Amino acid sequence: MMRPRSGGLRGWLPELAVLCTLIVAPIVFPHLGFSTDLLTRVLNWGLIGLGFDILFGLTGLLSFGQAAFFGVGGFVSAYLLVSHTIDSVWLALTIGTVAAGLFGLLVGWFAVRRVGIYFTMITLAFGQMAYFIENSPLSDYTGGENGIPGVPVPVLGFGAHAIRISAGMPMYVLFALIFFLGYVLARRIVGSPVGAILLAIKENTGRVAMLGHNVPAYKLTAFVIAALYAGLAGGLLGSFQSYMPPDAFSLETSGQLVVQTIVGGAGTLIGPLVGAAVWLWLRDNLQLIPGFAILWKLVLGIAFIILVIGLRRGICGEIAHWWNERRNLAAAKAAEAKTEAIEAHNIDPITKPVALPREVRLTIAEPTTGDSDIALEAKSLARHYGGLKAVDGVSFKVRRGSIHAVIGPNGAGKSTLFKMLLDEVSPSSGEVLLFGEKITGVGVSRAAQLGIAKSNQLNQLFPNLSVRKNLRIAALARRRGPMRFDLLRGAGSIPDVEEQIVSILGLLNLVERADTPAHILAYGEKRRLEIGMALATSPNVLLLDEPLAGMSPAERIATCAFIRDIGRSRTVVIVEHDLDAIFELAERITVLYEGRLLADGTADEIRRNPAVQDAYLGGLHAHEPA
Ligand SMILES: Nc1ncnc2c1ncn2[C@@H]1O[C@H](COP(=O)(O)OP(=O)(O)OP(=O)(O)O)[C@@H](O)[C@H]1O
């Protein structure tokens, strides 16, 4: 699917292929029934599609309101030119594009905090509002139902040397050039750290936030990028046809963009262009067939259904999928065979851990008051679900640099407590202090930025990304902060992030699996990757929720060894049912029972505590020294 650029000349092959196609298209395509004007129109749809694909194909956000930005860009630019407020078409196009971007910022502000269908509904509502405003209150400026006629074409050069870019071939060349530049830019964005994070948002939004990235800000960035592309395409449309039509704002425009993107292949950048070519060609040619003139929409609909059912990934998506499968077939088969071998024979691929990633400096100030030796403190934490007190007023302190365990029978409230420790779940009452600073209420991504990370009881991976890319999303978080607009650098070009990934791959013994998609890994490997992702954020306090669950005995021993290693450079809090492991690892143990604190003390104190023995399980007696 949408692949960032790999190194060397090969990495530029898609750009080269697009450039060659744009050059030969006006020679070849007229033989297939495409006039030069139709090709120009296709390029204009392709240009909106580049931005839309970053929003929809890459980030997974389906907008039904792109016509609003297309219309704003088009009408602002057309009005400025026709009213002679501005004479330069280039300047008017720039202002129109910026206006669309600003409108995108406004709409996106409301939309990106909603998910799924609610996001789509908000974009649809704003799109319809924009259509109404253009048609009614602003009709003095937009021409209402008549649109704006007489939009001038762009001019290159000045004075006597000025060249008007007229319809036909000159206009095609202009559109092809702008599309190509837009494509190169879009590819860079996809390959940047921002692009990597947007893709991860589509895979698992919650985990991206938990790692410390500001998810709404990234979604908003994708939204504004899509609005800018649409605004530029809108402005160009007016100049191309010397007329800005009111239907630029219509729901049909937004719908057509979605349809074309799905037909061409979402997540490929080039898909919307190909989809537009198919769609416009079918539309134009069906109308010419005698007897089809009235039925063409029906036939177009049937053609769409056949394409979507036959080519689930869209035309370009299927081609890209076939190509990648063919290229990676041997590697994919080997990876699956290894997984089968691990699962069938219980091969333990863990060896001795290698270098630990180095500790990052604390991003929070040392506490000026209180006990600076306390890394984490829960103060009367409670979480109630209706009448159920999952956690009921629990207080405990975790000493800096220690391994601290939280144990308790099933349903005692351990996972809920953990979720409150990093503000993933808001407490009903009480608070959490990280190095003396209150973090309750800051939100999970801010808490991660302050230095607390968690590996989850149930894996929260990015299943379709490779192991390396999973770790990269984690390692980028604290290194770059909650949000950064590094849209033009390569995601894999930050040396200390890559060093961090290599150390963690070694630590988890996943070096050979670095390029394997996470969903192919064996269960034990997935558990290790889950821990590795939390570790890759370089946390000062690492929470491990049942890290040994589902591991083989040999993996448990090796995982305990590296948890002990991790504990040398940072504070570790661990929830685990394997009491042998806990008594071996933990310096202090907090025991929960039915949501309440039952005991808190050293491993020896807990082992001998009669209340723990009575309430927790008879099996604790088994751990009594003989
Ligand atoms: N979102 C929720 N809504 C309602 N009840 C919940 C929710 N989350 C947890 N609970 C309930 O709170 C109690 C504590 O659950 P929690 O998962 O924290 O326990 P636990 O000690 O981690 O258990 P286990 O060892 O089985 O993972 C359970 O009774 C659980 O059903």
Image (cartoon, rainbow, N blue to C red):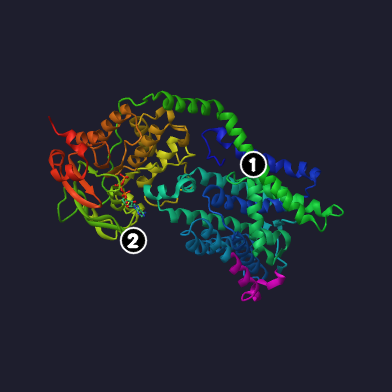
Main SS category, magenta section: helix
- Disc 2 to disc 1, how far (Cα)? 50 Å
* 129 inside magenta stretch: yes
SS at badge 1:
helix
Q: Toward the viewer: 569 or 294?
A: 294
Q: Which residue is mark 2?
A: 386
Q: Toward the viewer: 223 or 116?
A: 116
Residue at horizontal 18%, vertical 33%? 622
* 307 inside magenta stretch: no
The answer to whether 107 is drawn above or below residue 618 in the figure is below
Q: Amino acid at mark 1?
A: Cys
SS at badge 2:
loop
Q: Amino acid at mark 2?
A: Gly
Task: Point out residue 579 in the picture as x, y percentages from the top left corner.
Answer: 23, 36
The answer to whether 140 is drawn above or below residue 476 in the figure is below
Say if mark 2 contacts mark 1, CB within 8 Å.
Answer: no
Density class for disc 1 (Cα within 10 Å; few <14, some 14-19, many ≥20) is many
Q: Is residue 213 left or right of residue 44?
A: left
Q: Is mark 2 within 8 Å of ligand 1?
A: yes
Mark yes or no: residue 365 visible.
Answer: no
Task: Point out residue 122 in the picture as x, y percentages from the top left corner.
Answer: 54, 63
Q: Which residues are magenta?
A: 127-147
Q: Which residue is mark 1?
A: 316
Q: Is mark 1 within 8 Å of ligand 1?
A: no
Residue at horizontal 36%, vertical 52%? 445
Residue at horizontal 58%, vertical 33%? 324
